[in-house]
Structures are given as structure tokens and as C-alpha cells.
Amino acid sequence: MSLILYGAHLSPFVRKADALLREKGAPFELESVNIMPMPDWFKEISPARRIPVLRDTEIGEEGPAGTIPDSSAICAYIEQKFPEPAFYPADPYERGRAVWLEEYCDTELAMAIGLGIFRPIQFKRFMGEEPDVDTARKTYEERLPRRLDYLEGEVGDGPFLVGDALTIADVSLACQIAQFEFVAGPLDASRWPGVAGLVERLTGRDSFQPCLTICRKIVKQEPIDLSAA
């Protein structure tokens, strides 16, 4: 097995690379890395001090050689190494849109969900403290809607974010919304039906199940309904 994915199952960015590798049918090993504190050997291959990092042992078995940090760079590499099925459109414009929407989900959406909702709830639980529901609810009410409204408009009446086929943009979106649903339950399908439907279809795929199953065992508590007064 030449590919090793370093990271933690609960990271939506690890989840993105994990799902894409499985969609491609690419053999790989996911090696868990505890980043608090981050081991020195991992700092050497992760200049930005983030997960995931992919190692292709056909290129290098230790140190930085053969490694690629950052989920977007990793997914681009996976696409080139395993081109079928394609997750980046052949059409130049659609390809650009897919990469843009991947970036939007990985930044704008991820910051609102990860820092504003998941962390105040689940990180507090990990520390044995009460969830910071006020912060999570404020994010849900004030920061998240604009981002989801934009993505809802991009889905429109179609089954995917870009074109008529599954792309990296859809994978990225599903990975981020799954993070929300672990702690806050299903997305409001009456408010964001396109996004909710797309996420439900993707997270039900075989490629998502191994990682999601482990995550659900880690996040054991019941979700908190942030829409409740």
C-alpha cells in the first residue's frame, strides 16, 4: 500500500480526502495523528501545522519527501493519480467553479461551522465542560445562514453544485455539513432543501460511511437543536 493519510477521523478535511480516495477505489491507510500536542515528526511534514497530510511511499517513506499537506492539494493529487471516476470537471469553467466552491466550503463554511458551532459544543464536551450553546446558537442565527443561502442558490434545482455530475465541491460541502450535524442534528431541509438533499445523498454513499461511523462513536452525545428558542 503506497498511500498513507495522516490525520484524525473527526476532521472534515481528513474526511474529504478519505471519501475521495474511497470513491476512486484507491488503497490507502489512515494513520491517526494526535495533534494536541503535535509530534515533531508531523511538524516536519506539515508546515502549516494542520491535518491531513498524504504520503505516497512510492516517492518517499520518511521526512517531507513524498508528502503533500492540505486537503485541497491532496485531492488534486488523488485526481491525477487516479483519474477515474473524475471529480474535477473537464470543462474549464465548470472546473474553475468546482474548485472555487470547494474553497468556499473549506474556508467560509468551515470557519462558521467549525469555529462557531462544532468547537463551542464538542470541544467543551471533550474537556468535561458544558457546551457553549449561546455561541453556537449565535453563529447558527447570524453567520451560517448567509453561507448556506449562497450554497443553496448554487445547487438550485439540480442534483449537484456544478454541472450534472458529482464533483469535489459536493464532497467538500458534505464533509462540512456532516460536522454540523454531529452536534446540531440534520440541517433544516425546509430552509435549505437543495443543500440538505445533496448532503443526505452523499453521506449515504459507501465512501463516506467508514469515517462517519467512527465519528459517530466519538461524538456520543445527542445533538443540540440550535433553532430552538
Image: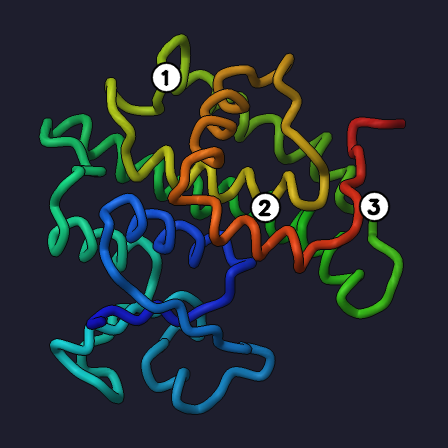
For disc 1, the marked residue is 159
Query: 70 and 185: which one is in front?
Result: 185
Question: Could you tell me the amino acid type at mark 2?
Answer: Gln
Question: Could you tell me the amino acid type at mark 3?
Answer: Val
For disc 3, the marked residue is 133
Q: Residue furthest top?
A: 157
Q: Is residue 94 left or right of residue 8?
A: left
**Tags 1 and 2 in contact by the CB under 8 Å rule?**
no
What secondary structure is found at the residue carrying circle 2?
helix
Question: Could you tell me the amino acid type at mark 1?
Answer: Pro
Mark 1–mark 3 distance (CA, rounded to whole Å): 33 Å
Please give the name of the residue rendered at 24% of the width and 83% of the height, measured from the top-left corner: 64
What secondary structure is found at the residue carrying circle 3?
helix
Closest to the camera, between mark 1 and mark 3, is 1
Numbered circle sitting on residue 179: 2
Please give the name of the residue rendered at 61% of the width and 18% of the height, measured from the top-left corner: 189
Please give the name of the residue rendered at 63% of the width and 28% of the height, measured from the top-left corner: 187
- Above-or-below relation of 108 to 69: above
- Quarter of the picture holding the C terminus: top right
